[in-house]
Amino acid sequence: MPAAGADDGATPNSPRSELRYRLFDEGDSLYTDMLAAIADARERVWMESYIFSADRIGRRFAAALARAARRGLDVRLHIDAAGSLFLAPARFLDILRRAGVQVREFHRWSWRDPWRYNRRNHCKLLLIDQQTVFLGGFNIHEENSLHYHGAARWRDTHIRLDDRQMADQAGELFDVFWTRRVHRSLRKDLPPDLFCGDSLVTNRIPRHRHALRRLFREGIRTAEARVCLTTPYFSPDRRTRRHLYEAASRGVQVDLLLPAVSDRRLLQMTARHIYERFLKRGIRVHEYRPRVLHAKTMVVDRRLATIGTANLDYRSLFHNYEINFVTDNPAICNALEDLFEADLVAARQVTLESLGKRSLLDRIGGYLGWRIRYWL
């Protein structure tokens, strides 16, 4: 796999022989790599996406999946029924099915069980054969493309992993939802130390429902020098907030990177409602200005890192099904913190003075959003 230059939105491969990786922060580079991987697949192409849009990006992926199916590969596409609502019409999915692609929609609306509609499959996962895994924040839509959206494209982060162990884990997790056996046991429990080695952490099965909260809390609790946290939606639960406060109180530099431009205005106002609590405890809050921020990463002391689909909000931590890659790989940790530092250059630091200039609408929206944060 060729090394990626900084100008194409990717980071070079890890020097650790047991795990080859590539980071992406530009959609066009990621989509090109994903489409090439699909074209080179020999056995299977399994794909999950919260949003799979029938736009120009989605049609390119649909064509690639159809070609793979016609070659006789095991091709599966699992999209979220709510996330792709109105974006992937039935006729679009039927074309894929006729080409031999197995297509399923996760948790379609049902009057017999309306409660399940609240639980969404927020994962973005592509598994190629038994060797390559893509995961992160990128959906399949034009909003992430420089070619189609120009300077207004979304800012996101994704990772490619070329590793048999990661592919085995991803395949097992994909199969849990595909076969609707979410209550079955996976091969092994979560490790005592989530940040030891490389692993995939998910909340897909009942006994792992708290895994993501544990992931964020463990990382923050063990921080000694710095926590760099990027999330588009920020309404952490009480215990996670307490861990952030305690980290700052023991001298850890805590930097939060949140969006100045958001696709979910109420969630942005909700986050701003609690900025003051963090600022008064010495936690630095930055708002990324150029475009919509959708990346979900955390780096601790340049020695621990996670990248994936989970936001630091109630929906990700309590309702949605998510998947994150966790690592103590020094090269990945350094690369993610370097991306964080580059984003800070394009961000403005929030102060108590600037926070006091919020509009009345922003204040009211934040107050109301915080009251219903569990359901947002």
Image (cartoon, grey):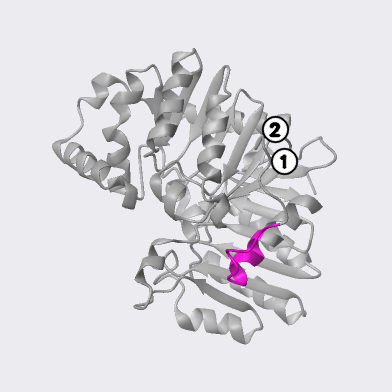
Quadrant of the rendered image containing residue 371: top left
Mark positioned earlier in the residue sequence (1 or 2): 1
Alpha carbons under labels 1 and 2: distance apart: 7 Å
Can you tell which mark lies on residue 328? Answer: 2
* Nearest to the observer: residue 324 or residue 214: 214
Residue 219, x across and y down, in percent? 57, 30
201 on left or right of 168: left
- Can you name the residue that lies furthest to the bottom here? 98
**Magenta region, residue range:** 173-186
- Can you name the residue that lies furthest to the right here? 17
The reply to whether the C-beta atoms of the residues labelled 1 and 2 are less than 8 Å apart is yes
* Nearest to the observer: residue 119 or residue 34: 119
Can you identify the residue that label 1 sits on?
198
Residue under the image location 66 percent in, 83 percent down: 100
Residue 240, x across and y down, in percent? 44, 33
| Element type where label 1 sits in the image | loop
| Element type where label 2 sits in the image | loop
* Nearest to the observer: residue 139 or residue 252: 252
Quadrant of the rendered image containing residue 285: top left
Residue 47, x across and y down, in percent? 63, 65
211 on left or right of 242: right
Residue under the image location 16 percent in, 40 percent down: 364
Residue 179 is a magenta residue: yes
171 on left or right of 104: right
